[in-house]
Image: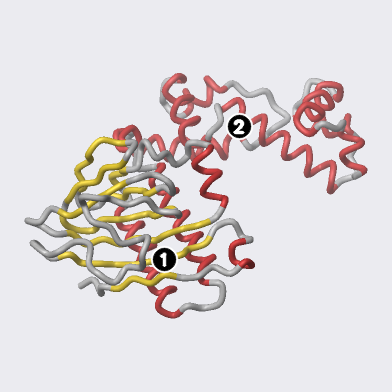
Amino acid sequence: MTRNHFDYFPASPKTRSWGLYATSFGQIQVTPHTLYPPSGHPEGHHFDWKQGRTLQEYQILYIREGRGVFESALTKSKKINPGTVFLLFPGVWHRYRPDPATGWTESWIELGGGYLDHLRASSIIDPKNPVHPVTAVGEVESLLDAIEQLVRHRPPHFLIRLGFYAMQILTLLRTSSSRHQKAPPRIYRIVAEAQACLAQDLEKDFSIEQVARTFGVGYSYFRREFKSQTGFSPKQYRIEIRHRRTKDLLRNSKLTVKEISEQLGYSSSYHLSLDFSKRTGLPPTRWRAI
């Protein structure tokens, strides 16, 4: 049985300097045909269906049980079913409520900080796409249970820790999109194994097509799924690994640029220097000296 409670937390300047922190957390079980939302929220958070509400912070809401409806200034009305997360954005009018026939059980965490503004500006979170059916229900609920424990005991710096728990929930939403739900689990294993494969034997020429054949999948499908899961094409991924390894060797070894280029499979030290300068703005020898 969910214990109904909600807490609002002031964030000190030191907490705000982290760029990610919690400002409230709550869990409510709304029984059928009950007034919603319940009383007790501070001014600026309480709302009714007719007027709706606009917040100054971000919120993540998770519906464990029951069903209802959500809408905002940027979206049409959305049906909310069990196992759904919806996001509230600062400055965006919204309203939501459970179906009177079913009620619902909700958990929410409110967040502040510039990090979330960055995610919004990068379209990683999008006020035009606020509703997310969750496939990793068990993981999301475990994270919310951990959040509840932190709120209950309030150890030092718990507001910051709450913020990073919330980021794990947002990360899980990225793997809960409709396209990922249709992708067979086998491709997740293939991409994970391919990442390890591409990070090895950097001095050797590598055929990405051969990697795909090794795992028994078509190249186009493999490339598309690899980029979806890692953010890089297979070729780009290998280039990134080579660049990071170059930095490691420049910092932590006495190898010359020519020796590093040979060890990591560059066609020449000139090509290593050219690629390195484009990425860092400095040639390898100057970067090493800093």
- Left/right of residue 129 with respect to residue 277 in the rendered view: left
Q: Amino acid at mark 1?
A: Ser
In the rendered image, the vertical position of residue 4 relative to residue 92, given as above or below: below
List x then y, in percent, for residue 146.
40, 68
Nearer to me, 243 or 17: 17
Residue pictured at 37% horizontal, 54% vertical = 60
Residue pictured at 44% horizontal, 73% vertical = 150
Q: Quadrant of the C terminus?
A: top right
Q: Earlier in the sequence, mark 2 or mark 1?
A: 1
- Left/right of residue 287 with respect to residue 197 in the rendered view: right
List x then y, in percent, for residue 259.
87, 33
List x then y, in percent, for residue 87.
36, 48
Q: Dot 1, how many residues are within 10 Å of its Cα: few (below 14), some (14-19), or many (20+)?
A: many
Residue pictured at 38% horizontal, 46% vertical = 173
- Left/right of residue 12 with respect to residue 89 in the rendered view: right
In the rendered image, the vertical position of residue 196 relative to residue 279, given as above or below: below
In the rendered image, the vertical position of residue 253 relative to residue 32, given as above or below: above
In the rendered image, the vertical position of residue 92 relative to residue 167, given as above or below: above
Nearer to me, 285 or 205: 285
Nearer to me, 1 or 88: 88
Residue pictured at 51% horizontal, 49% vertical = 116
Q: Amino acid at mark 2?
A: Tyr
* Residue receiving disc 2: 237
The label number, if any, that marks residue 60 in the structure image: none
Count of numbered tags: 2
User: Distance between the Cα atoms at labels 2 and 1?
Assistant: 39 Å
* Residue receiving disc 1: 24
SS class, disc 1? strand
Q: Quadrant of the N terminus?
A: bottom left
